[in-house]
Image (cartoon, grey):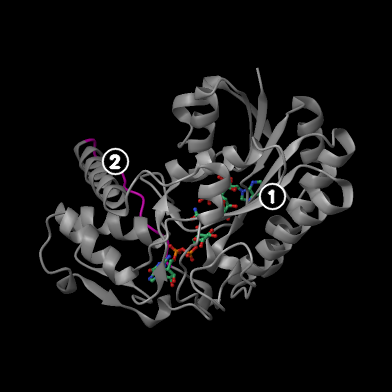
Amino acid sequence: MPRALIIGVTGQDGSYLSEFLLDKGYEVGAVSRKTSSDSSWRIGHILDRLQMFSADLVDQSSITKVIEAFKPQEVYNLAAMSFVPHSWEAPVLAGEATALGVTRVLEAIRHSDPAIRFYQASTSEMFGKVSQSPQNEDTIFHPRSPYAVAKVYGHHITVNYRESYGMFTCSGILFNHESPRRGLDFVSRKITRAAAAIKLGLQDKLKLGNLEARRDWGDARDYVRAMWLMLQRDEPDDYVVGTGQARSVRDLVEFAFAAAELEDWQQYVETDPKLLRPADVEYLVADAGKAARVLGWRPEISFEQMISDMVTHDIQELTRARQQGQAVCEPRPERWKDV
Ligand code: NAP
Ligand code: GDD
């Protein structure tokens, strides 16, 4: 049985990658950090099939111990402080976890078994203020947040360990990907959740920031397949993964409200200057030609299908919560301006 270790298993991608690898017959080691509240809701249904470990990217010995104990053949580093506004609130922590954390994992691999194949969750945010469109593996980076700066470090150190030590390290430069398991703070889920809540009469208004920002939004269930494909090649390399289609936040709102059968989305949506970022990324769109050519990867779930799934899921979840008298989680306000 092949053995894969997923760091960041409690996140959106960690949960889908776990399911994907279990279906392929892998023994899956799953790393989460110790927190005071339970964060395993996305993997509750497969917990008994995972080997759970505790480790934190800011703590070298915890990472080293897990890798030595589980002895994986593949390691997927999906852990990061992934919500961009949080990185302005805690820029040093962003660097510790999202940048240096990658080196900690690479060092643990290098000293325990340098033959382990490593996947690093890089991001289209590294392109930031873009120099060309669409963006591919050769596009220069111009990061626009402490998060993106940290990810650029993570990307380069991943390439560097390949070049310095001949290790099998890959960097997946993934564009935005969403799903019904997306965190409530990210704009897609904030919108689908609000459309569902408004439809059910639980909410009146939705406050948003920059409606003109454009992203290349794909579905997380497609993107975890690309991660795995990268580690199955004969040679390690870096790949851009995206759909090649950009849409604005405004387009997303329009589509989600229509999916909830709400006419005239403008009457519900307000823009709030407090939700604008100190520096935003205005336009990202992928040229994923290399992933298609070399990995045979193509997205299978359309934007429309994904947003419809998210709206349907949110309507069902809120309906159930209401029937059972449960409290409903809300997105947190973006707070960086109040600090
Ligand atoms: P996510 O849902 O926010 O999950 C992030 C995971 O990282 C969580 O399991 C979190 O654990 C863990 N984590 C955070 N800090 C940690 C630390 N110090 N030590 C150990 N674990 C830590 O993110 P996602 O959407 O699944 O994304 C997965 C990865 O891909 C991230 O690195 C993200 O930056 C990158 N990425 C995402 C996208 C996207 O559109 N989704 C695009 C490009 C790249 P807790 O549950 O304890 O918080
Ligand atoms: N979150 C949020 N909330 N974003 C808003 C809002 C709002 O109320 N209003 C407008 N936006 C705009 C943001 O300014 C940004 O331009 C865009 O919507 C997308 O924001 P997010 O969904 O928070 O995602 P992101 O693009 O900043 O980052 C995500 O994708 C990256 C890949 O490009 C995260 O998943 C990152 O971890 C990932 O690397």
In screen coordinates, is 241 left or right of 246?
right
State the separation of the CA atoms marked 2 and 1.
47 Å
Spot occupied by residue 63 in the image (x, y as percentages of width and height): 77, 40
Q: Which residue is mark 2?
A: 326
Camera-nearest residue between 120 and 278: 120
What residue is drawn where x is 25% and y is 45%?
A: 318
Instruction: Look at the numbered disc 2 and give the secondary structure of its residue.
Output: loop
Percent x, y of residue 2: 66, 22
Secondary structure state at the residue bearing disc 1: loop
- Report the disc number at residue 335: none
Q: Identify the residue under disc 1.
A: 237
Q: Toward which corner of the image does residue 185 lie, by quadrant?
A: bottom left
317 horizontally vs 129: left or right:
left
Dot 1: within a 10 Å radius of its alpha carbon, few (fewer than 14), some, or many (20 or more) residues?
some
Residue 70 vs 14, above or below: the answer is above
Specify the amino acid type for callout 1. Asp
What span is colored magenta in the figure? Answer: 324-333
